[in-house]
Amino acid sequence: MTTADTDSASSLRRALKLLRVLADGDPEGLRLKDIAEATGCSQPTAHRMLQDLAAEGFAEQAAGKRYRLALDFYVLAARAGQASGLREAARPALLRLSATLSDTIFLLVRNGFDAVCLDRVEGPFPIRSFTGDIGGKVPLGLGQGSLAMLANLPEDEQEAVIRFNIPRLLDRGFLDEASLRSALAQARTRGWVNTSTGLIPGMAGVGVPVLDAQGRAVAALSVGTLAERLNADRLPHVVKILQSEAQALAGKLNPFDVALRYPSRSLSTIGGS
Amino acid sequence: MTTADTDSASSLRRALKLLRVLADGDPEGLRLKDIAEATGCSQPTAHRMLQDLAAEGFAEQAAGKRYRLALDFYVLAARAGQASGLREAARPALLRLSATLSDTIFLLVRNGFDAVCLDRVEGPFPIRSFTGDIGGKVPLGLGQGSLAMLANLPEDEQEAVIRFNIPRLLDRGFLDEASLRSALAQARTRGWVNTSTGLIPGMAGVGVPVLDAQGRAVAALSVGTLAERLNADRLPHVVKILQSEAQALAGKLNPFDVALRYPSRSLSTIGGS
DNA sequence: TCAAGAATTCCGATATCCTGAATTTATCTC
DNA sequence: GAGATAAATTCAGGATATCGGAATTCTTGA
């Protein structure tokens, strides 16, 4: 709690919070009153911020006076940057995997103590997953890809993440620390994860890490499918093809230094909030 | 120039400009000094804004003190594009089209006076296009999909767009207003556009509009390929399959009210800047 | 049609933000 | 490897833009 987020913050930070509110809210748009309430600022203030956001193309007013994020925001993010670099680089792999396996494929990256779904290509089967849509977050350790990444972090980081995430994992139905650690050990030695034990009934998946030059996990590719589609016959094939794509992707990533934004400030920031 | 962007603007708008600078800049990150210069504010000011952005997870410091956009920004943006859920809804169609035609498929939406590339699935052939990557913009009227959308706007809107875009189109190699209007008329009656006349040598494409319940274009599907791959034999087939997907997509869109953000403020806003 | 609620505008007080200078840190050259 | 240069970061005072309450206009629902 070095920098409290409860009380006063700079006007910029309040505006950014406002953006978050918009992003989390109904895609159809939010009413000014609700926005003001959610951000904790007065109605005129929210209104003025939204005016500025709209003037810059970051927000727009839909029918019914509702405010929502505008396309420019998306365009900006899509255009450039490290995250989208990875996404662009991985897109062909996702498409190939999806076409070959006829299943839903996820691209995850690590962000602090979470795994974030950067991209997803849907297969023909209806899937339920923790990660959910693009942009969805899960604690590191929950789910195939998420677990695969956690297993391939440097010792100390892994330990810090585990300590921080254990309560969150338990909250979401995970068994206990011992089984997490044994799963991690297995994942590290085998190089892949499968979740047939399924916290989600009827679902199963395989996740493999994408490693950087130092052998640390920077991302993960994973498959989510129906449990019946991951039988003993098919599993080895799925693992093999996933690993092959992950390795190819890792090769392309060499020039990138995917920032883990971990040791510097984020630990205290995230831990403290 | 109602609201000048040259001189003073609210601090929020300056911060948003800063975000633009970051997005446009080197993915590896930008130096504080250059950021300050690009945004036109002093170095300490830029620094403070970046601190706030970093604290909220919108920016981060890569190695070498360089600043760049951070993951949270992309996560948020991923949802901004979903304003209409269009991208998710269209994804399967894009994949089918790409698989069937073995060509590059674009999903475009209208945004003010531009067509924006919301999604793209690459085919095996190397393509050059105006729209470029995801997030890329072109003036309405330039390119297959862009033209298909413009052709299917309500009269008055179309007229306003044409007036505004003519100079921009001429700048980019378009012939003249008369040929634009005849192309639009043809596009409207036929229901599709093909650009074999190619402003880009060797390239050709087909674009069809995605219409809402009122018959207005809200999006477009288009194919971009090598001119030799769009011969008289194949063209009808491509048109047919594109139209069929566009129609199916339009059906899915019924419940949505895709805001055109047009008549209210955007015209003056965009026109004035 | 009326009424209640929401959105937008206005205005004064004040907290916040900006500019300039100083200090620390990194980078470059030899 | 060490000095010098340039950038990054911190600090403080003063000006200004920001904030919130109240009034007005507009919309929504009865």
Image: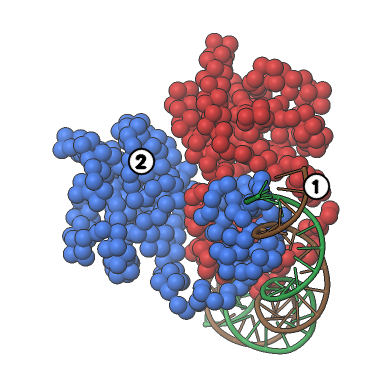
Chain colours: A red, B blue, C green, D brown
The residue shown at (70%, 63%) is B48
Q: Is residue A49 visible?
A: no
Q: Quadrant of residue A132?
A: top right
- Residue type indicated by callout 1: Ser
Q: Badge 2 is on which residue?
A: B105
- Secondary structure of the residue carrying tag 1 is helix
The residue shown at (49%, 53%) is A75
Badge 1 local density, few (<14 within 10 Å), some, or many (20+)? few
Q: How far separated are the C-alphas under marks 1 and 2?
A: 45 Å
Badge 2 local density, few (<14 within 10 Å), some, or many (20+)? many
Q: Quadrant of the C terminus of chain B?
A: bottom left
Q: Up-down: is C11 above or below B44?
A: below
Q: Position of residue A102 (x, y in %)?
A: 47, 25
- In this view, the residue farthest toward the left is B232
Q: Up-down: is B231 above or below A148?
A: below
Q: Chain of mark 2?
A: B
Q: Badge 1 is on which residue?
A: A268
Q: Is residue A267 visible?
A: yes
Q: Nearer the viewer, mark 1 or mark 2?
A: 1
Q: Is residue B254 left or right of residue B51?
A: left
Instruction: From the viewer's side, name the closer residue of B134 and B263.
Output: B134
Q: Up-down: is A137 above or below B264?
A: above
Q: Position of residue A27 (x, y in %)?
A: 55, 53
